[in-house]
Image: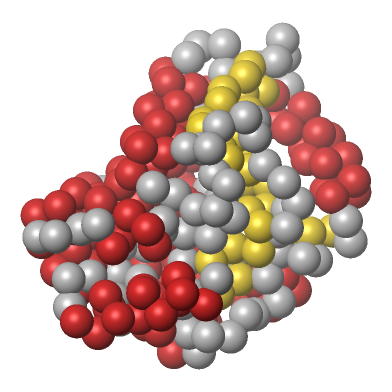
Amino acid sequence: MTDSINGNVVINTSADGITTIGFYHPAQNSLPAHLLQALTDKINEAGNDPQTKVIVLQSAGERTFCAGASFDELLRIKDKEAGAVFFSGFANVINACRKSPKIIIARIQGKAVGGGVGLAAGADYCLATEAASIKLSELAIGIGPFVISPAVIRKIGLPAFSQLTIRAVDFQSAQWAMEKGLYNEVYANVKLLDEALDTLTHKLASYHPQALVGLKQILWEGTEDWDQLLTERAAISGELVLSEFTQHALNSFLEKK
């Protein structure tokens, strides 16, 4: 999965119907627009594939699940329309997860930041390691987690979301994420994580497909307006990213790297 300087998204379906969608980017698995589009396409593809019984969403490496938006790409945004298009990429991935008829299991092997937390919240069930701490750093760069907030609040509730957002420079532990409802299971290391993932996905793949479809519909009840809601939120972020504050914050961050 790690053969491209521009990152990539790969998909594979096993003989027993477990479809794995994996993504990689050399900058801590951050997500530029082309990877967001590829993730959306692959999630839709797996959801429409009659051979797929359950979907696993994962990333390469062990240290970071996803660092969120690509800062390099954020700095290249020059007008609010382009900004809205970029942040709509995250909206499209979350909506693809929401509307997929297949149960999506996220494998969170390392840190999740910003949009990476949104990806985890877009899954139906999350397995993580103790190294999978989380942070919503958007306020620190002047934008705020507007696109992903409906998905995150749906999982962890408003009080925990408030803490995660307001303490924008602080990581919260994987145990905290499980206690608040973002993660469902946390394991000591990647080996144990993958053993649990293998057991769970094979069990799910053996269940009645229509029962799983019905469960998926129940899990996402009340989110029917998200196509419009997340698009509106993307426009807010797309305008804020143009501000002098945000441009300065992004440049300062990149200079420290």
Q: From the viewer's perspective, tell me whether residue 194 is left or right of residue 66.
A: right
Which residue is pictured at 45% across the width and 31% down the height? 43
Closest to the observer: 150 or 69?
69
Q: From the viewer's perspective, tell me whether residue 205 is left or right of residue 118.
A: right
**Residue 210 in the image, given as x and y percentages of width and height:** 52, 23
Q: How many marks?
A: 0
Q: Is residue 85 above or below residue 47?
A: below
**Residue 256 in the image, given as x and y percentages of width and height:** 52, 77
Closest to the observer: 57 or 203?
57
Display colour scheme? secondary structure
Quarter of the image with the C terminus in it: bottom right
Query: Quadrant location of residue 149?
Result: bottom left
Query: Quadrant location of residue 148?
Result: bottom left
Which residue is pictured at 81% across the width and 34% down the height? 198
Q: Is residue 218 above or below residue 206?
A: below
Query: Quadrant location of residue 203?
Result: top right
**Residue 212 in the image, given as x and y percentages of width and height:** 56, 31
Can residue 162 be seen at all in this image of the molecule?
A: no
Quarter of the image with the N terminus in it: top right
Which residue is pictured at 57% across the width and 23% down the height? 11
Q: From the viewer's perspective, tell me whether residue 187 is left or right of residue 115.
A: right
Closest to the observer: 6 or 84?
6
Q: In the image as oriented, which residue stretches furthest toward the front?
A: 255
Can residue 24 be seen at all in this image of the molecule?
A: yes
**Residue 197 in the image, given as x and y percentages of width and height:** 78, 40
Which residue is pictured at 25% across the width and 51% down the height? 86
Q: From the viewer's perspective, tell me whether residue 237 is left or right of residue 160.
A: left
